[in-house]
Image (cartoon, grey):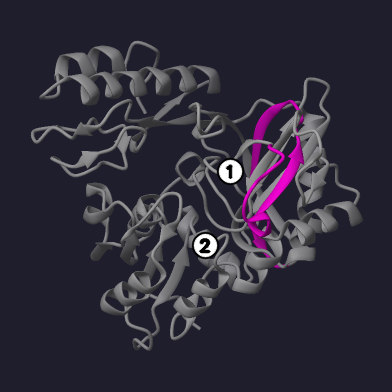
Amino acid sequence: MAEPADYLIVALSARALTVAARRGGVRAYALDLYGDSDTRASAVASEVVRGDIARGLDDDALIEAAERLAPAGMRPPCGFVYGAGFEDRPDVLARLSVGRRLYGNSPETVARTKDPHTFFGLLQSLRIPHPEVAYSPPAAPEGWIVKRVGGSGGGDVAPGAPDISDLRAKYWQRCVSGRSIGVSFLADGTRARLLGFSEQWASPTARSPWRFGGMMQPAGLDRCVEERLHTLLDPVVKALGLVGLNSLDALVDDDGCFDVLEVNPRPGASLDLFDPGGAGGLFALHVRACDGTLPADLQPRAHATAMSVVYASQAIRVPAAIEWPDWVVDRPLPGSQLASGAPVCTVLAAHETAEVARGLAAARAAAMSMVLDYDDEPSEARLSGNATRSGTAA
């Protein structure tokens, strides 16, 4: 069956997938929380769905918006691709899949992958190292963290506590140390094709000490550690039936020992870092992998890449006359009102080495924070002066 020409794309933020779809030459209809200007520019049509980052997209509003933009039963059938936001709601995925061709993991696979009893039981059976897990509050909470089942982005991770409400939606993990490593891969249900390794870092706040801050690739791991992590992928993919773009998160210590934390059964933030763009880009590879076809070989990107999320340090209004640098994505509409702590935009950077790319991304994030938090109108001189001091522009 021929691949669709039209795709409904749904995520907390649909920008990366929508832009990747347009680069791949297909038409995208986007639904998310933000309605950023670059999402709108890349989509045939888009809508903002009510909800918030903590509770996700409102289920009923999402279904209604999907019917307006890309009705179930379109002829030929519309493809459906999703990103973050459904880890704890496979039932909504099932509703959106009716009358559309799903390109992604099935609702049943998402449920298995994000259920901690099932997932950590699988790791145990495969003898894959992972942190100790508990499903009720530890008697001594020191040295534990508590996670919401189906959470994403690190905002739902908190230090362990002995009395937590709604225990059905929480589980506890023993704290372990190490670098936060992401393993990005394509899968066809039985095999995996490695994309690469990234390193992630947090942008902590008092209430969210593990809030996602950014990532870079390559991660610069020892070859033996990469090989051991790579070896895990096929057994995990086969056991869970994973398809398309996915990622595995692990903590790797200085001795090369690692603990697997979770699998994200959908495209994620690493799409920006690994996507070469064009007809052979990751959107097309995701669709083909979901149909059972993996590429024979994947060439690494020529340059290291990094990204950093810019959060509002105070309530702000996006300047009406702002001209975004070309290294800024997830661009809110001019005049948008953003609460303190809200994600504002994402900055990208590329360089020959990952550490320089990371430093460049950090400098660009700082420049954007200064412009957005303190200026009534953006300063082009300030942006250009801070943007290029650490290396080559992306």
Magenta span has 325? Answer: no
Please name which of the two marks, 1 or 2, marks the residue nearer to the observer. Answer: 2
Residue at the spot of label 2: 86
Residue at the spot of label 1: 299
**Left or right of 156 on screen, residue 327:** left
Element type where label 1 sits in the image: loop
Image point 56% across, 58% down: which residue?
266
Image point 35% across, 51% down: which residue?
15
Which of marks 2 and 1 precedes in the sequence?
A: 2
Asked if 288 appears above or below 354 in the picture, the reply is below
Label 1 neighbourhood size at 10 Å, few (<14), some (14-19), many (20+)?
Answer: few
Frontmost residue, 232 versus 368: 368
Q: In x, y percent, where is residue 188? A: 67, 66
Q: Amino acid at mark 1?
A: Gln
**Left or right of 227 on screen, residue 385:** left
Q: Amino acid at mark 2?
A: Phe
Which quadrant holds residue 149? bottom right
Label 2 neighbourhood size at 10 Å, few (<14), some (14-19), many (20+)?
Answer: many
Frontmost residue, 298 versus 111: 111
**Left or right of 324 on screen, residue 58:** right
Image point 49% across, 39% down: which residue?
273
User: Bounds of the magenta span?
Assistant: 161-189
For the image, the number of numbered tags is 2
Q: In x, y percent, where is residue 46? A: 25, 63
